[in-house]
Each structure stands twice: as C-alpha cells, then as structure tokens.
Amino acid sequence: MAQYSTRIIGAPNTLEHRVYTEQNGAVVSPFHDIPLFADQANSILNMIVEVPRWTNAKMEISKEETFNPIKQDVKRGKLRFVRNCFPHHGYIWNYGAFPQTWEDPHHTHAETKAKGDNDPLDVCEIGEQIGYVGQVKQVKVLGIMALLDEGETDWKVIVVDIQDPLAGRLNDIEDVERHLPGLIRATNEWFRIYKIPDGKPENAFAFSGEAKNKKYATEIIHECHEAWRRLIASEALAKTPSYDLSIYNLTVDGSPLQVKKTDQTYTSLPPDSRKPPAPIDPTISKWQVTFLCLHLRALSFSRFYISSVQV
C-alpha cells in the first residue's frame, strides 16, 4: 500500500495553518489523488483523518484551495472549535473523509429527500488508536448514518481501522453494538447536540436516527465515488455562483486539470514551515452542559432540548 506523509504549514490554531498530503515527498490531493480503495478485492478503503479523537479544532479538507490541504474551518473570521458537550470530549472518533467521493449538491437522495452537502463523504473511525491530522488510514466499512444538516444530506460512514484489535470481529453495524455497546447511541447524540452551544437547534437524522448496515453504506459510497468521477472529469460543475471547487490533481489520467510537477500550479506550493501550536481560548476546554429531558431512554432515546450552559 502507498505510504503517505504530511507537509505542515505554520502553527496549528492559526488562520495560516495548512496540512498538505505527500506521497514519496510529492504533494498530492487528498480529495482527488489518494485512491478510494486501498484493496478493492478485500473491501479495504483509504480514509483521511481530519480531526483526531478527543480534539476540538474543526479541521477539514479545503475543497477550494489548490491540492486541497487540510485547514481549520473559519466562521466570521474566527477559527471554529467543537465544544465539549458533556459527557463527550471533542470528537469521539477519528473523524475524516473518504478520498475520491463527493456529495453532489445538485442530487436529491430518494430516501433522505435532501441534496448532498457538497463535501467529500464523512467518516467516523471507531478504533482505539488516536490518529493525527492528515493521516491516511486503511479501514473497513461497518455502517452509515444520515444526518440532515441545515437541509442537506450529510452522510456519516462508520468504519474501523483494519489494524485495530477488534477489526476481525467488526464486520457490520450490529457488531458495533455487540462489541462496543453504546457507541452508536453516543454517535447519534453527539451529532444531534454538538451545535447547540453555538446557539443552533438540535440536528435531525433521516431514518429516525437508525444506523444503516454495511451493504447500504457501500451503496452510498459507490454513489458518491461516481459523483466525484463526474466532478473530476468536468461532467459535473466544479464552479457555480455558490461554490468553486479545486480539481487540480497529479494522478487522475484524462482529467482536465491534471498537472505535472513542473507546472507553476504545483511548483508554487509552499514548503514545510511547521511551528508549535498557537495558544487557544481556554474556554474551548470547558464542559458545555446541555440539559435534555429524556423519555424512554432505553427504548427510543428521544429527548427535548431545554437550554445550554457553560461550567
């Protein structure tokens, strides 16, 4: 399997910080150049870690920048951090994306009744090893959940690192509850409440929050891989009045914006300039206690949001 490393620009927790993906010392796009399948015959996929477990910085692949480095999301000029919604601390899995996938914002899914969110397909890796930003993991698919985020379909694929001690016993979504009881429920809760401390309402799920099985997840992955193929081939629009995606790449033969390492687009990429992390607002580490009225928790896990406070 291919070996990947990171080229780090600037200090974490700053607007300038970027994490590029390298293969044999050459920058490649984690959106376009890393293959979706590490071993298709054995259903092993590549994923890119954007946010390591237990961390708060909302890191994501930059769809708009050349060669798609990972950067921290920004809102109203400020870096975004996910709050610690009690009892959770930061992200509760290694969170990232599948390369060579795209949730097409022009396509309405027949079952969710909502269009794609214009991102690579999101991935929650539930193994015990904490990853690092820009890490490329080989994973097996277990299931999928359909978050409805501000009117868009935002799929969350549940996977496990093939090197994890439990990987041999985790083969479908029901195995997760058997060997990691409560994790799927915690995942549902995390996605429902994580925006509440920022003043937003509780998120909703399609399928009443049910996690669909591996077969269903695999179908969605293939749909999003085909959507990406149309994007990289310019059969789907990379630029519209509402978005401008970079489809520069080194390796996708026949794609309109495949470039060579001698092209200025490539030679102008910045060299490694890593620095120690910048300090962050200490309130990021505080608990956000969300008061919920739980009704028939063991059976339906339904609840109603009352308020959110910081302690």
Image (cartoon, rainbow, N blue to C red):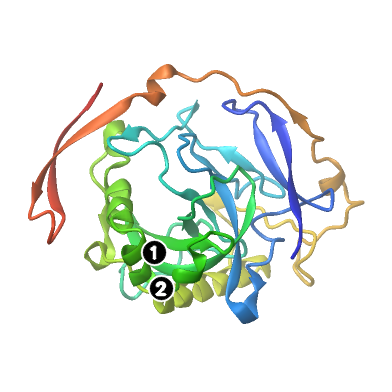
Instruction: Locate residue 76, reporting x and y percent.
Output: 45, 29
Instruction: Locate residue 127, reporting x and y percent.
Output: 49, 55
Using residue 94 as the reference point, say whether residue 181 is left or right of it: left
Residue at 60% x, 43% y: name it: 132
Residue 87 visible to an observer of this rendering: yes
- Which mark identifies residue 310? none
Quarter of image, res 114: bottom left
- Which mark identifies residue 115? 1
Instruction: Locate residue 193, reporting x and y percent.
Output: 27, 43
User: Please, which residue is most extreme toward the left here?
Assistant: 295
In this view, the residue in front, 240 or 68, is 68
Amino acid at pointer 1: Lys
For the residues carrying marks 2 and 1, which lies nearer the camera in this image?
2
Instruction: Locate residue 32, reporting x and y percent.
Output: 68, 60
- Which mark identifies residue 172? 2
Q: Residues within 10 Å of mark 1 (few under 14, many from 20)?
A: some
Query: Mark 2 or 1 closer to N-term?
Result: 1
Residue at 57% x, 64% y: name it: 162
Residue at 64% x, 57% y: name it: 31
Amino acid at pointer 2: Asp
Using residue 36 as the reference point, say whether residue 211 is left or right of it: left
Residue at 72% x, 61% y: name it: 33
Task: Give me the C-alpha separation between circle 2 and circle 1.
Answer: 26 Å
